[in-house]
Image (tube, rainbow, N blue to C red):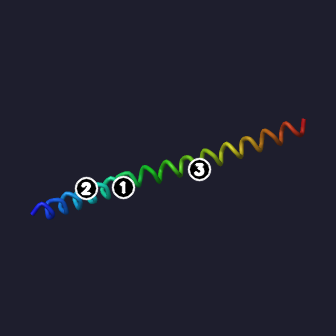
Amino acid sequence: MLEKEAIKARNKALALSQADVDATAPAKQAYQEATAQAWQAYQEATAQADKEEAST
């Protein structure tokens, strides 16, 4: 009986863990995309500034 309760508790914990992963996945994806866009914008701005500095 105790083993069945332990299995139920473990399964519930696994389900809650998966629900947490599912719930946070869209936010994680949005964060990664925003970070990538910001990094690309920074690199482009830095490259442009370096180019302008080199030409002066």
Q: Is residue 41 left or right of residue 12?
A: right
Which numbered disc flags the more N-terminal residue, 1 or 3? 1
Secondary element at tag 1: helix
CA gap, disc 1 and disc 2: 12 Å
**Residue tagged 2:** 13
Quadrant the N terminus occupies? bottom left
Circle 1 Cα neighbour tier, 10 Å, few/some/many (<14 / 14–19 / ≥20): few
Q: Which residue is mark 1?
A: 21
Helix, strand or loop for disc 2: helix
Task: Check disc 3 and report the residue beneath it.
Answer: 36
Kindly report the distance in space between the C-alpha atoms of the residues bearing marks 2 and 3.
Answer: 33 Å
Q: Looking at the rendering, which quadrant does residue 22 occupy?
A: bottom left
Seen at 77% across and 43% down, the residue is 48
Badge 3 amino acid: Ala
Figure quadrant of the C terminus: top right
| Residue at x-position 28% and y-position 59% | 14
Identify the residue at horizontal 17%, vertical 61% (top origin): 8
The reply to whether the C-beta atoms of the residues labelled 1 and 2 are less than 8 Å apart is no
Amino acid tagged 2: Ala
Q: Residue at x 65, y 48 (%)?
A: 40
Q: Earlier in the sequence, mark 1 or mark 2?
A: 2
Which tag is nearer the camera, tag 2 or tag 3? 2
